Image (cartoon, rainbow, N blue to C red):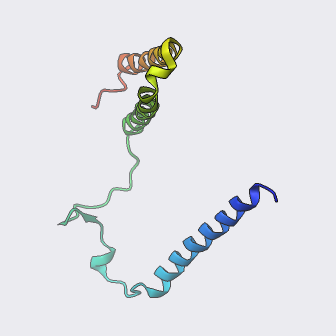
Amino acid sequence: MSPLIPLLVMAVIVGAIAAMFILASVYLGPSKRHPVKDSPFECGIPSEGYDKGAMTIHFYVMAMLFIVFDVELAFLFPWSVVFRSLRLFGFLEMLVFFIIVGAGFVYAWKIGALEWD
């Protein structure tokens, strides 16, 4: 038996469940439209309006920097668990990793990517 068959079966099951949820919401959900339900909602207070304009590039740069440093922390936790068994090699590898990520952080700081104006 091919090792891909269980993956295909799982993909079919997941697709069927997703289709079932979508169809259930279409057929079982309320279908009456109302202006209050169609209006934008902001934390329980009436909306001041809906701006469909583009967001500034600073928002996207800040989000990407957050993801980069969040992934760095995702690598840090497993490394800290097996730190003693890796000995000097593991320490030097993480030191190189931190130097590369730190250089990226310093670069982002110097070009002003962390400033919110």
Task: Report the residue at 75% width, 56% height from top.
Answer: 4
* Residue placed most toward the observer, 85 or 4: 85
- x then y, percent, for residue 73: 40, 31
Q: As drawn, is 26 to the left or to the right of 73?
A: right
* Residue placed most toward the observer, 17 or 23: 17
Task: Report the residue at 37% width, 16% height from top.
Answer: 110
* 73 over 4 or under it: above or below: above
| Number of numbered discs on residues | 0
Q: The N terminus lies in which quarter of the figure?
A: bottom right
- x then y, percent, for residue 88: 49, 11
Q: The C terminus lies in which quarter of the figure?
A: top left
Residue at the far right: name it: 1
Task: Report the residue at 46% width, 80% height from top.
Answer: 25
* 116 over 107 or under it: above or below: below
Residue at the far left: name it: 45
- x then y, percent, for residue 8: 71, 62
Residue 59 in which image quadrant: top left
- x then y, percent, for residue 55: 38, 45
* 32 over 82 or under it: above or below: below
Q: As drawn, is 43 to the left or to the right of 24?
A: left
Residue 83 in which image quadrant: top left
Residue at the far front: name it: 85
